[in-house]
Image (cartoon, rainbow, N blue to C red):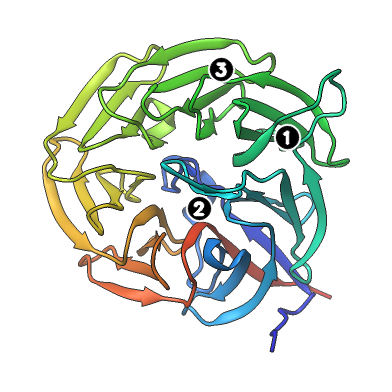
Amino acid sequence: MKIFIPVKYILITFFFGLIAIGCANKFTQKEQATTADTFQVLVVEQGRNQVKLFDSNGQLLDSCQVGFNPHEIEYDSANNKVYVSNFGVEDYDNTIGTPGTSLSVINLQDLSIAALWPTYRNNITVTDTCKGPHGLKLRPPSKKELYVNVEFGDLMLVYDTETGRIKRSFPLAKGVHNFQFSATGKTIWAIAGANGIYKYDADNGKETGHFATATPVRGLTFTAKQQNVILSCRNEIYILRSKDLHMQKHFTHLGVKQIIYSCISPDGRLLFAPCPYDNLVLVIDLKTGDIQKRIPTGKAPIYVRIGPNQKQAFVSNALDNDMTVIDLSDFSTHSFGQVYKPNGFLFLIPMMNKH
């Protein structure tokens, strides 16, 4: 039986810039200086094609069916909606399945489907083949445009959040899997696996920078004020100066395979790096590159994000039946929620309306 959350809620989320490639910390998210211990977690359950809402203790509150093999999720505070990419295939490195052709738009008032936005463009003269929507982000600062990269077609689609229509599109480098915006919204940082990272002008799609990595890059996040960008690769971490992509540090021989969507600790000292093929999260000192801890998790951890209380790190285990929560005070762990093959997730702070 579904348990519906009360409709008299204002749902406020914190955008995580790593993003999602992204991660919240006191340097990148000033509004998180004041946080709450009571929050909700909205998780994409890839294995059952739905989104699940949990309270801060991992108790299920509600759920909503979406498309096949959903991956990423983004919150729109202006419209009180959530966008989910129906990727359609298993993963970037495992393309079993059928590439998806839609985004699910969810109304947060009752956690129901409000619309399906197609990835096909109507303003072209040939049959559109845009499929496999994956990364999706609202462009700051106005957040009136939703950017979505499609992997089968290597394009960026730009949606009008009021109408759901595709306003424009532009080509991306081959292999782009996800992306992040600069704080101003003027620059797109795209991760392209074995092809490294690319920078694009968010207005016209012009390529403005490229950095080739020795191994596939599968995650990207920023240090304080986006001064440096951190790349998660295979058994290595790059730290580049954002303005010119000049390498500042390079941590190698970490004793793991591929690293995915890493996250910086609230104090900016540590990097929590998920290693799906090793079933653990590395805790790396960002100053020295030393490994402070190897934290066992569930199967195939891919995302790490700091919770709103700044006391915990949440981990989605992509091939397991739950998430893992890491206590930042002592690195102890516990299981969170019942969710089959969790993927992208975000946090919500419920607040009762005043009368």
Q: Which is nearer the eye, 94 or 164?
A: 94
- Mark in front: 3 vs 1: 3
Residue depicted at 22% across the width and 43% down the height: 257
- Mark in front: 2 vs 1: 1
Give the image location of residue 1, x and y in percent. Answer: 69, 89
Q: Amino acid under label 3? A: Tyr
Lower position in the chain sequence, tag 3 or tag 2: 2
Q: Secondary structure at mark 2?
A: helix
| Local crowd size for mark 3, using a 10 Å CA cut-off: few (<14), some (14–19), many (≥20) | some
- Please state if 253 lies on the left or on the right of 232 as rendered: left
- Mark in front: 3 vs 2: 3
- Please state if 189 lies on the left or on the right of 219 as rendered: right
Q: Which residue is mark 2?
A: 32
Asked whether residue 138 is in view, the answer is no
The mark found on residue 142 in the picture is 1
Give the image location of residue 344, x and y in percent. Answer: 52, 54
Residue depicted at 72% across the width and 48% down the height: 103
The mark found on residue 200 in the picture is 3
Lower position in the chain sequence, tag 2 or tag 1: 2
- Above or below 12: residue 140: above
Q: Secondary structure at mark 3?
A: strand
Q: Amino acid under label 1? A: Ser
- Above or below 248: residue 181: below
Residues under labels 3 and 1: Cα distance? 19 Å
- Please state if 304 lies on the left or on the right of 353 as rendered: left
Give the image location of residue 248, x and y in percent. Answer: 24, 20
Residues under labels 3 and 2: Cα distance? 28 Å
**Are circles 3 and 1 on residues that touch, CB within 8 Å?**
no
Residues under labels 2 and 1: Cα distance? 19 Å
